Image (cartoon, rainbow, N blue to C red):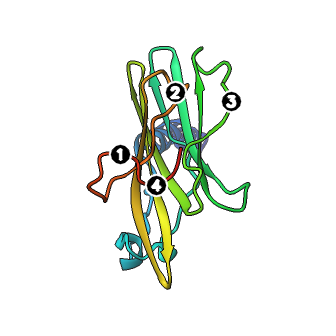
Amino acid sequence: MTEYKCMKRLAILPVMAVVLLGVMTVVPPVKTLPLASAADTNLENAHDVKHEAKAPIATSGNNVYIAWWSNKTGNDEIMFRASTDNGKTFGDKINLSNSTDRSVDAEIAAQGSSVYVTWWEEVQKGSEETRQPVFRASTDNGKTFGDAFVLTTNNTGADTGNK
């Protein structure tokens, strides 16, 4: 092979590398998601539902709020912490569920000085397990929370005994 042909072939390598790198950075990797089974979508079969560890976050102004579920006591509970300085420091941990039932899948939202936390209580009644959505709200930036409400009942007051 002549020197000219070798140089011509080598000259194309940087162009090919740039093209390949461009394709690799432009095309996102394909992520496969597991198919939902009947157990994942049936809210009445609590023992079949898988719970992914999460710590949802909400912000409002300089306030940062985090909720999560923890099993440090041997029973899953919904925990909460608040920061008033953009997350530099956090106040004490608050157990929002404080329940004998299993409390999981917390979600959180905030607007102004109000903080809203929801989760699921997995309740065992005899041989039957059910899931009940629960709601608690704070109107003072997460310093204190009102009573817990089980949303599947028609009561206007707290009926869970959770405080």
Q: CA distance from mark 2 to mark 3?
A: 11 Å
Indicate the amino acid at tag 3: Asp
Q: CA distance from mark 2 to mark 1?
A: 20 Å
Residue named by callout 4: 160
Which of the two marks, 2 or 4, is nearer to us in this view? 4
Is 156 in front, or is 52?
A: 156
For residue 107, which quarter of the picture? Answer: top left
Residue in the picture at 47% in, 21% down:
140
Q: Are marks 2 and 3 in contact (CB under 8 Å)?
A: no
Q: CA distance from mark 2 to mark 4?
A: 20 Å
Tag 1, which secondary structure? loop
Residue 92, label in figure: 3
Q: Is residue 125 above or below residue 82?
A: below
Is 58 in front, or is 163?
A: 163
Indicate the amino acid at tag 2: Gly
Residue 157, label in figure: 1
Residue named by callout 2: 142
Residue 23 place in picture, x, y as percent: 43, 44
Q: Is residue 98 visible?
A: yes
Indicate the amino acid at tag 1: Gly
| Relative horizontal placement of residue 113, taking residue 7 as reference (left or right) | left
Indicate the amino acid at tag 4: Thr
N-terminal-most mark, 3 or 1: 3
Q: Is residue 1 visible?
A: no
